[in-house]
Image (cartoon, grey):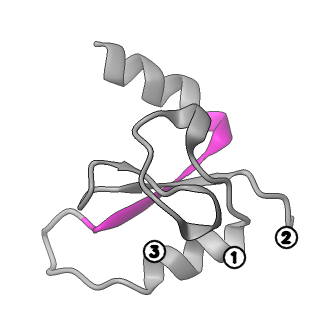
Amino acid sequence: MSATAEWLIWSNEHHAWWGPGHCGYPDNIASAGRYTLTQAMEICAGRSWMRGQVPPETMIHESCLPQVIAKEAA
């Protein structure tokens, strides 16, 4: 398992990305924090939500960003 920081966290609660070092919620991808897989899993697993509801946080791999950007532009 790679320890490379290549995961971003989208906050459905704040409608923004998690910032670097768990600080802030920037609304642009360039300012978003990058986390290792372990960190991203811990962040997302640390929150609870009701079955059938949107989770508070979602982890997204950097390789998926072109698809995210295209969806936002549509």
Indicate the secondary structure of the residue bearing disc 3.
Answer: helix
- Name which residue lies at 86% across and 64% down: 2
Picture disc at residue 1: 2
Asked whether, in this view, residue 28 is left or right of residue 36, the answer is: left
> CA separation, marks 1 and 3?
10 Å
Q: CA distance from mark 2 to mark 3?
A: 18 Å
Q: Which residue carries the number 3 mark? A: 44
Task: Determine whether 34 is above or below 32 in the image.
Answer: below
Quarter that holds the N terminus: bottom right
* Residue in the foreground of this view, choosing between 46 and 28: 28
Amino acid found under the numbered disc labelled 1: Thr
10 Å neighbourhood of mark 2: few (<14), some, or many (≥20)?
A: few
Q: Earlier in the sequence, mark 2 or mark 3?
A: 2
Check disc 2 and give the amino acid type. Answer: Met
Q: Amino acid at mark 3?
A: Cys
Q: Quadrant of residue 30?
A: top right
Magenta span has 58? yes
Magenta region: which residues?
55-64
